[in-house]
Amino acid sequence: MIPPVANPDPTDPILRVGGLTVSFATDRDPVTAIRDVSFDVNPGEILSIVGESGSGKTVSLLSILGLTDPRTTTTSGSVIFKGKRILELPDREMRRIRGREIALISQDPMTALTPVYTIGMQIAEQIRAHQSISRRGARKRAVELLGEVGLPNPSEMVDRFPHQLSGGMRQRAVIAMALSCNPALLVADEPTTALDVTVQAQVLDLLRRLRKDFGSSIILITHDMGVVGEMADRVLVMYAGRVVESGTAEQIFDDPWHPYTWGLLASIPPLRGPRPERLASISGTPPTPANLPPGCAFAPRCRFRFEPCSNPPPRYKDDGHTALCFIPPEDRPRLRATVLGGERSAA
Amino acid sequence: MALTILQRLFQMLFVMFGISVLAFLIFFATPGADPAARIAGRNASPETVAAVRANFGLDRPLPIQYGLMMKRLFVTRDLTSFVNRGQRVIPQVLDAAPITLCLVVGAAFFWLVGGVVLGLLAAALRDSFIDKASMAIALVGVSIPAFWLGEVLNLVSQSRFHDTWLFAWVPALGYKPFWSDPWMWFKTLLIPWISLATLYIGLYGRVLRANLVEAYQEDFIRTARAKGLSPGRVLIKHALRTSLIPFITLFGLDFGALVGGQALLTEVVFGLNGIGRLTYQSLQTLDLPVILATVIYASFFVVMANALVDVVYVLIDPRVRGS
Ligand SMILES: Nc1ncnc2c1ncn2[C@@H]1O[C@H](COP(=O)(O)OP(=O)(O)O)[C@@H](O)[C@H]1O
Ligand SMILES: [Mg+2]
């Protein structure tokens, strides 16, 4: 079983990420894909990381799991899982955590499963990597898991190959596999992006149920603010490899501080009330890590930039709510109203 | 699955029929050339040419000529060579075929094992010294012509160092049948195997390495690693299994071509009277019946090797199976 950990207090964060910085060696200069990313995940909490594609969400996850390529990647900062620093762990010990205590649900269910094996075999393989259990026992468990994630007819599905399942069914199979060792932390990288809308809702439901039934913590990566609003307890907004705003879901939805967050929020069509005349999405494209502008990385796309923005922005903090922006607290409501309309009410 | 395989085998028969027709047409219906004169050989007397014409039914319509020819090739098996004064063609081919098969199958074993080991090693330790060194050696292996390597090995093992303990076991050149003395058979073929396999080990190792490195970009490899599997298991069970398809495709092509006569140079260097050598000799004397028989034999092997490869696809990749 899991050895006792240094701080058994059940309310301590199970994952603490501090100052995580990851750079890749490329043909030219090394590029820093994420810089100084810090966050905590509390037990039973859903933390959502949101940002456009290319903002470094996947890289953050992979480096937490130790899955980046050590030949080309330099990682610094600290990742503390259940009181243990895991970036420094030798691979053999890290393997015991991967799949058993931290499980990954990756972005595209179409490509996430090995095409030449049945889903039952792939689930059983993970179980057998971490527990001594007979082939038959593992298979039985795989059938149970497939039933738990709502696949119809699991005892038949277990012998299907990935290409014989629809996208939604594959994602369920991937989730069943991630759950197979009752992980304390589930890391889901855009689990619904590749699925159509009704299936998306079902998969999100399933994740919520997992949290309720098993008390798993979940890191849910998405670029869809709508998903964030439905799922998250806390939110981390990433832009160009940095956390530009973080806070509880209420803080982010009721009192967002960063113009980038405003843009993301403005891009969700409101559920109630009159539709805005236009969807104020953010113009332009995000910078690549290789050519970040000096100062605030969002400045070139920001409607509210002013002189100081060519310098590195300060981090405002208040009651766990942080933002990386020059706009002083007293100016926020006025500027925000030009993007989001009057005062926001609870989402 | 059985249906898919059956279907494939049926296709194979169809292709073989097509090839036999094509080969026949090329030899017997090329405009402007008299097949009877060619079969009779150079400087044949008019009587011989007439005899050939009657013998092969060359004065009858083409479909009947084809039928007669196939009958003599496959049913009565009494096709005879005129250049070599009535020598039967089919027994020659049947004598040569096992020699080529033994040479190529044995070499294939070496190069498959060698290629997989080399590719896996290089991919597992990629960018390390071992990777670079093995790829450099592979490049050398690919660049060495098989016949040159064969000659060097012969020089070393047959004359220069034959009397040392290292090579004293090496028998004289030439083929020894398996049934009369298996150990002798093995000893005579070992050096030819190595000389033929060297080129392919380098080639296959490099191809496999490239495919493995590419496979490591796949999402499912990330999934496998995120499951907490050991690096060895990820490499063998997940990356290798899905990287084998191009490897096997290549194998089907090379194997078919070698069995069909492309091992000629190795056969000549080691004095093995295989199909390659037979084809070569018959080309030199323009012995048309033998050329026809070997061409058809060779193309059948190419087709069979490819059908076999397709069957292997079905076995290793469920996506190819009909649902
Ligand atoms: N192995 C790598 N080598 C170089 N650059 C990389 C590598 N992986 C990711 N990046 C870069 O890091 C940035 C963040 O990527 P990613 O984390 O995948 O974004 P997201 O998941 O938020 O869409 C991208 O600009 C990407 O080009
Ligand atoms: Mg991503």
Image (cartoon, rainbow, N blue to C red):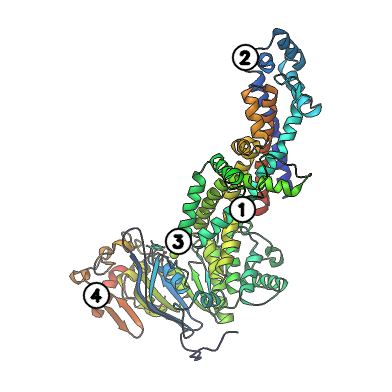
Identity of the amino acid at label 4?
Phe
Q: Are marks 1 and 2 on the same chain?
A: yes
- Name the residue tied to disc 2: B33
Q: Secondary structure at mark 4?
A: loop
Asked if the residues shown at circle 1 and circle 2 are in contact, with their CB atoms under 8 angstroms apart, the answer is: no
C-alpha distance separating marks 1 and 4:
80 Å
Identity of the amino acid at label 3?
Phe
Mark number, residue A326:
4
User: Taking the image as drawn, is residue A35 in sight?
Assistant: yes
- Residue B195 picture location, percent across and down: 59, 45
Q: Between residues B23 and B163, which one lies in front from this camera angle? A: B163
Farthest top residue? B46
Q: For the residue carrying disc 3, how many other residues have a C-alpha within 10 Å: few (<14), some (14-19), or many (20+)?
A: few
Q: Say whether mark 4 is within 8 Å of ligand 1.
A: no
- Name the residue tied to disc 3: B129
First in sequence: mark 1 vs mark 2? 2
C-alpha distance separating marks 2 and 3:
60 Å
C-alpha distance separating marks 3 and 1:
30 Å
Tell me the chain of label 2.
B
Left/right of residue A204 with respect to residue A287 in the rendered view: right
Tell me the mark number nearer the camera, choosing from 1 and 4: 1
